[in-house]
Image (cartoon, coloured by chain):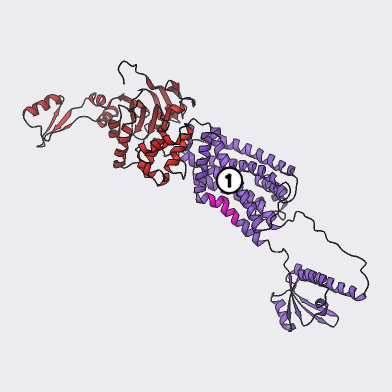
Chain colours: A purple, B red
Amino acid sequence: MTGPFRALSLAIMRGFFRDRAAVFFAIVFPLMFLVLFGSLFSEDSSPRVEMVQVGAVPLFDDLSDEARAAFDETFEVSHSDDLDAAIDEVRTGDANVAVVQEGDTIVAHYTLADPAGAAITRGAMQAFVDGANLAATGQPPTYSMETDPVEDESIDAIQYYMPSLLGWAIAMSAAFGAAATLQGWRKSKLLRRLQLAPVSSTTVVGARVSVTVSIALVQMAIFIGTGALLFDLTLTGDWWMAIPLVVVGTLCFMAVGLLAAAITKSQEGAVNAANFIVLPMAMLSGTFFPLEGAPQWLQSFAQILPLKHLNEGMLDVMVRGEPWTAALGPMLYLAAFATVVTLVAARLFRWETA
Amino acid sequence: MAAGRPVTNAIEVTGLTKTYGDLRAVDDVTLAVEEGEFVGILGPNGAGKTTLLEMIEGLREPDSGSAVVLGLPAWPRNPALLPRIGVQLQASSFFDYLTAREQIRTFAALYGVPAAHADEWLERVGLVEKAGTRVEQLSGGQQQRLSIACALVHDPDVVFLDEPTAALDPQARRNLWDLLSGLNDSGRTVVLTTHYMDEAETLADRVAIMDHGRVLVHDTPAALVRGLDAATRITLADGEVITTRDPAAEIARLADEQRLAGVQVHTGTLEDVFLELTGREYRA
């Protein structure tokens, strides 16, 4: 590392970490979303069915231990002696189903307010009744079932949100950093002042880029650490490929920030323009919610957004268990996008703000 | 300047012109600044001082004409020239959120100057006590001192200061003059722009007066005033005003008459020079 490069990088790095607003929006703010989303969606996606047993229900009370465990996974049971009160509970939404056994008949009073819950309730109860019937015949079962959970695209919330929110965090800090620096330095004439120092523009740009890339890698470490410590984040095989992906992604969004600075006249304007570009892009790239339910034209449009490619690339290698080669396509797209946007920004750039 | 040593020009400007749309910001300016000289470029706002300076610094491409600094063309950007010139731009060009010491050390590093030397400059401009203070918390005068120190930290042969006292109150301006007046002591060439008459008169060896993009005159303040076809006014203690073209003889006569006590002599000033050259009052 040469003297000027080191000095410039240090100056920019200090400037960043002493700027509370910059640190907040680059690190704290996205981290708040990670903790929020991680907590909100970490509960079982299908909460247990709340069942009120009225009086003794021998069918359920006498289940084998194995069957009882399965039963408890599906139902959260409370007991009552008053059928009318139990049905009232169902009616007011405090319980999903009230169950009473009359002789050999199980009577379930359930609500249709939640059709999916009602279907689960009916199906599960029918299964237990059928199982009990089979056991009562004393015959061994003809058919049996084994379950094998497959890791598919419907991954856990934290697995989805860690890479997606990280992509957004990186996009924000890279775009804002580049936009604010270019505008601020132009306004204070620091850019002119540096032009008159015997350092090449490569050194100046290189220092700025290296700081932003370092910040992005710090963001990445913090996100992975938080996901692993607070939630059950599990990275898959070639997750390390996310590092070069993050580097290219940072360059791409710095270019977006340069463009925002080139088309605006003040530091506030540049930051607002960067925000105007990045926030909707985050929405459309599935940062806050998956896009599977969105209309087809919207999903097609999202394919041109660099953040979509950054997010998909990171999801692939970090949590979906895809091989490292899965990140190459996104990296290529991000690099091409960065090149085009930088060229446009360079053409639009004016030394004078007036 | 040592006797016998040939006078060389640190800066040679020939026919320099810069046009923005219909405005001729700098109009065919020719100017030479000797080595070790302190030159003040004086003119009202919008006279073209900053544009002229930025062309000499190599920040702007002239439409025509040339600027040669220390024997090297200023445009295009010349990496061999840059370490030999120091520049203070009109705005306070600092890095955000850095302390005074961190600022000057950063600039020093850009020129390969060790940190210890940067700290010395902090001392020379009287900012040692403010070394750990962030620039945004420094007063206007302290910021200008730091800015000047940052321009000089690599001991350049030629230094350009663009209106260093513009935003300062009168007291801070005079404090800064003490610092500025010594800058060319060691043979350094100083070019300073200002719109204050008194500042140019006090600091500069020679003054170039600019208006509407043109340099009207370029000479020592005394010679400029001498060249005026203006009478000297002598105000006596009793309020009598004598207007004369031969102040020496008049004062000798007053001395003979023992009437010198309380006398005020008002000769021409650069304001009179400006009025004479442009036909209008000087308004900074």
Q: Nearer the viewer, residue A217 or B204?
A: A217
Identify whether A209 is placed above or below B31. Answer: below
Q: Is residue A169 visible?
A: yes
Q: Say what amino acid the circle numbered 1 marks.
A: Ile
Residues drawn in magenta: A22-32
Task: Locate the N terminus of chain A by quadrant.
Answer: top right
Q: Nearer the viewer, residue A190 or A92?
A: A190
Q: Position of residue B280 (x, y in %)?
A: 28, 32
Residue B2 % position (x, y): 31, 19
Q: Chain of mark 1?
A: A
For the point 77% across and 83% down, the residue is A55
Above or below, B33 against A229 in this view is: above
Secondary structure of the residue carrying tag 1 is helix
Q: Is residue B167 left or right of residue A349?
A: left
- Main secondary structure along the magenta-highlighted residues: helix
Please indicate whether residue A306 sits to the left or right of residue B53 in the image.
Answer: right
Residue B50 appears in which quarter of the rendering? Answer: top left
Q: How many marks?
A: 1
Q: Is residue A303 visible?
A: no
Q: Residue at x 49, y 27 (%)?
A: B77
> Is A210 part of what is drawn in magenta?
no
Residue A29 magenta: yes
Q: Nearer the viewer, residue B40 or A115?
A: B40
- Crowd tier of the residue under label 1, counting other residues whose Cα lies within 10 Å: few below 14, some 14–19, many 20 or above: many
Q: Which residue is tagged 1? A: A215
Q: Residue furthest left?
A: B257
